[in-house]
Amino acid sequence: MSDRYFENQYNDYNGETYLTSNNQLIPEIYSNVTHWIEHYTRKLERHIDRIDPSDGSVYTGSAGIALLYLRLAILFPSEKDNYKSKAKMLIDSGLQQVNGKRISFLTGDPGPLAIAAVIYNDLNDQSMANRCIDKIISMKDDAASDSKPDEFLYGRAGYLYSLIFVRRKIRSDIIDNRIVTEVFESIIKSGEKYAKETRSRSPLMYQWHDKEYMGAAHGVSGIIYLLLNVAQDDLCSNLRPYIQSHLLPTVEFLTVTRLPSGNYLSSSDSTTD
């Protein structure tokens, strides 16, 4: 199956030090990385007019590029104001496409709204930032309902990520911990329920379109990664017991289903790479 992967042309790690004493990349690597970031940013900007104006999503639309500019503003402080201005222009366009149809960070409304809240907060427009946050919070009941999927790309795990994104980028008390807890526990309960119904060996199991995916976008790995990330956060210490009771046992289940090749199953009914 050699056509299923890219050949690694780099040497194995041999003990060289790539980080400085304060955990930053050494200058020669840093300059090379930033060179290519700038190169591909310029390439992107030459074609930015090709963006579909009807796509305001993080995944494939204007909000995703706005998020890139937010990161660039951190990486290149001398260009901070320029990048933040570009981010605002793109997110203003993306917000025009918010329609309440999807609940996730990548493909739904919470993603552009969360990014917009951070941008407006950075620009000291607290009124607009609060409006965006209020809209995200208003989707909580819909996200926590039994009718919604759990996976990251379209489901409530993506909504949970939006809440955490805002809290970490703005401040911890901007979204009440009870909201985070309710959404977190709705994902746990859904996984428990489905695992019992299907007699899964894992304490948590999820399905997407009647298929038990194991990967990141639609599957168990993506959901568990996010839940672990949230439960380990000091702001969510009330959720920490779930690490031992549900999350780590689910990780153990994933590891024992590993294929002889060393790869992992794409879904519970797959038998080959």
Image: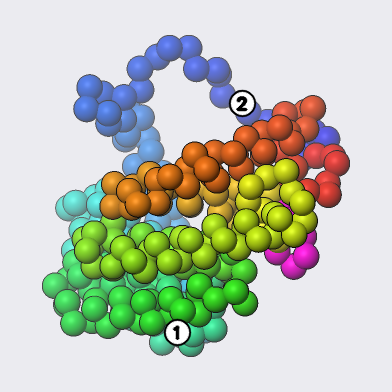
Asked whether residue 219 is drawn in magenta, I would say no
Count the labels in the image. Answer: 2
Q: Which residue is mark 1?
A: 98
Of mark 1 and mark 2, the one earlier in the sequence is 2
Numbered circle sitting on residue 9: 2
Q: SS of the residue at dot 2?
A: loop
Q: SS of the residue at dot 1?
A: loop
Q: For residue 130, what is the image quadrant?
A: bottom left
The structure residue drawn at horizontal position 37% and vertical position 35%, both measured from the top left corner, is: 32
Residue 133 location in percent, x, y?
30, 76
Residue 205 appears in the figure: yes
Residue 69 appears in the figure: no
The amino acid type, in three-letter code, at marker 2 is Gln
The amino acid type, in three-letter code, at marker 1 is Val
**Which quarter of the rendered picture does the N terminus lie within?**
top right
Which range is magenta?
208-213
The structure residue drawn at horizontal position 25% and vertical position 52%, both measured from the top left corner, is: 74
Residue at far top of view: 14
The structure residue drawn at horizontal position 65% and vertical position 61%, both measured from the top left corner, is: 193
Dots 1 and 2: beta carbons under 8 Å?
no
Task: Identify whether 271 is placed above or below 48.
Answer: above
